[in-house]
Image: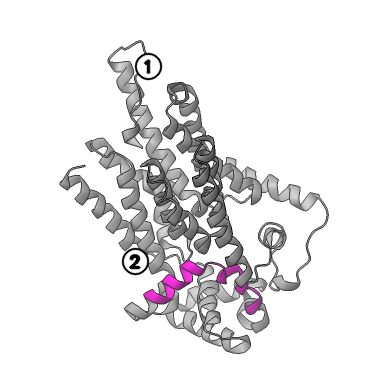
Amino acid sequence: MNRSQNILIFFIALVVFVYGLTSPYLNWDMIGYAGALHYSDNYRNEELRKVTFNDIQKFVPSEVYRELTQSSPYRATVATNPESLEQHMPFYTIRMGYLWTMSATSKIFQIPVAQATYWVASFFAGLCVLVLGLMFNLSQLWWLLLFPLALHLAGLTEVASLSTPDSMAAFFALTAWYLYQKNRRWWTLLPLTLLPLVRTDFIIIAGILGIFSFLNKRQVQAVLYFVLPALMYIYVNKVNANYGYLKIFNFTLIGIDPFPATMHIQTTLMPYLNAYAEGFGAFVGHKHFILFTLYGLCWFKYIRPQKKSLLNQQVGLVLGFVLFHMLLFPAYYQRFFAWCAAIAGLQLATWIYEIRGAHRIRKSSAIPFSEKTL
C-alpha cells in the first residue's frame, strides 16, 4: 500500500475508535468489570457493592442506571445484595488482561473505571482495523470503499462501543493469524499465549493453529502452540476460582441466577438440547450465517482445487473457530465472532473480484489466486 492508502486505513481506524468513545452502549457488563477491578483492589461484601454502584451511578445517565439496576428482578438483586454481586466476580476477574488495561487507562487518563471499560474496547477495535488493513491488499478504490462497510457488517463497530474485552480478544486473534500467515510462526506464540488472559475460550485458536503446524510437520511449534496457551489457561482459571464449564453453561444458556455460586446444575438432557437448538437457531438466523456460508461455498468450489495452503488454513481457522465455539458454547453473540466475519467478508470480496476478472478475460483454465490478498 502507498502512503495515501495507509493514511486512509489509519483514518478508518481512528473513526472506529472515536465512534466507540462517543457512542458507548453502556451495557450491563460494565457493572461486572468495574466490580472486578474493585474486587482486585480487595473490596469485599457491602464495600464492594457500594463502590461499584456508586461509580456506575455517577457516570451513566439516571435512566440508564435504572435500566441497569431495576429492569428485572435479577438485576435488582445484584444491585442491592452484596453477596450476589460478589458471587458474580469469577465471571469477570478471569479477564485479567482486560482488567489490567482498564486499570492503567483509568489511572493514566484520570477517568472513571466505568468509562475505561469502553475506552479500552474502542482502542482495540481501532487496532483491529489496522491489522486487517495489513492483512489484505487494499490497493484499489473499490477495496477502500468496501472496507469500512465490511467492518461494520462484521460487527467491529459494535465491539468498539461495548464494555467487554471482545475487541481486545479480536485484536490478539487477528494478530496471531497475521503473524502466522506471514510465516512469523515463533512470534505467533506471543498473542496465542496472551489470549487466555483476555478471553479463555479463544484458546480454540491456539488449538487450530497447533493442528495446522502439526500437519505441516512443525512438531515443536505445534507442541508450543498447545502447551503455552494451555498453561496460561490453567493459571487464569485457577487464580480466579473459575466456576467451571457446566456452571457457566447453565448460568448463561439455561437459567440465569443472581446467586451463581449456589445455583442448581441441570442433570437432565432436555435443557441442554434446548440450549443447543436455540443457539444454532439464532446462528442460522444471523446475517453472519449467510456470509460464512458464501465464504465456505466459494472456497470449496473455486479455491480448494488451487491447493493454496494459507487460504485453506484461513478457512479452517475462521470456520473452525465458529464451529468449535458453537459446539462448546451454543450462543451466537456477534461480538464473539466479529473478527471471523471481518476476515470472511473481506476475503470473499477478494475472491469474487478475482473470479469475475478471470471470467471477463475468458480464460478457460483456472487463474491462480494470489495469497498476497490474505
317, above or below 130, in the image: above
Neighbours of disc 1 within 10 Å: few (<14), some (14-19), many (20+):
few
User: Tag 2, which secondary structure?
Assistant: helix
Magenta stretch: residue 99 in it? yes
Dot 2 amino acid type: Thr
Specify the segment rendered in magenta: 86-105
Is residue 148 at least partly visible in the picture? no
Indicate the quadrant where residue 15 lies: bottom left
Residue sitting at 27 percent across and 40 percent down?
Answer: 138
User: Tag 1, which secondary structure?
Assistant: loop
Position of the N terminus, as image quadrant, is: top left
Please tell me which residue lies in front, 303 or 17.
Answer: 303
User: Is residue 65 left or right of 311 when viewed as pictured?
Assistant: right
72, above or below 291, in the image: below
Colour option used: one colour
Indicate the quadrant where residue 309 lies: top left
Please tell me which residue lies in front, 155 or 210.
Answer: 210
Residue sitting at 37 percent across and 43 percent down?
Answer: 150
Which mark identifies residue 366? Answer: 1
Residue 139 in the image: state x and y as whole percent. Answer: 23, 37
Reading the chain from its start, which is encountered first: label 1 or label 2?
A: 2
Residue sitting at 60 percent across and 86 percent down?
Answer: 44
Please tell me which residue lies in front, 320 or 353.
Answer: 320
Q: Do the numbered discs 1 and 2 sit on residues whose CB atoms are within 8 Å?
A: no
Tell me the mark number nearer the camera, choosing from 1 and 2.
Answer: 1
Which mark identifies residue 22? Answer: 2
Neighbours of disc 2 within 10 Å: few (<14), some (14-19), many (20+):
few
Magenta stretch: residue 335 in it? no
184, above or below 42, in the image: above
Residue 217 in the image: state x and y as whole percent. Answer: 51, 36
351, above or below 139, in the image: above
Please tell me which residue lies in front, 23 or 171.
Answer: 171
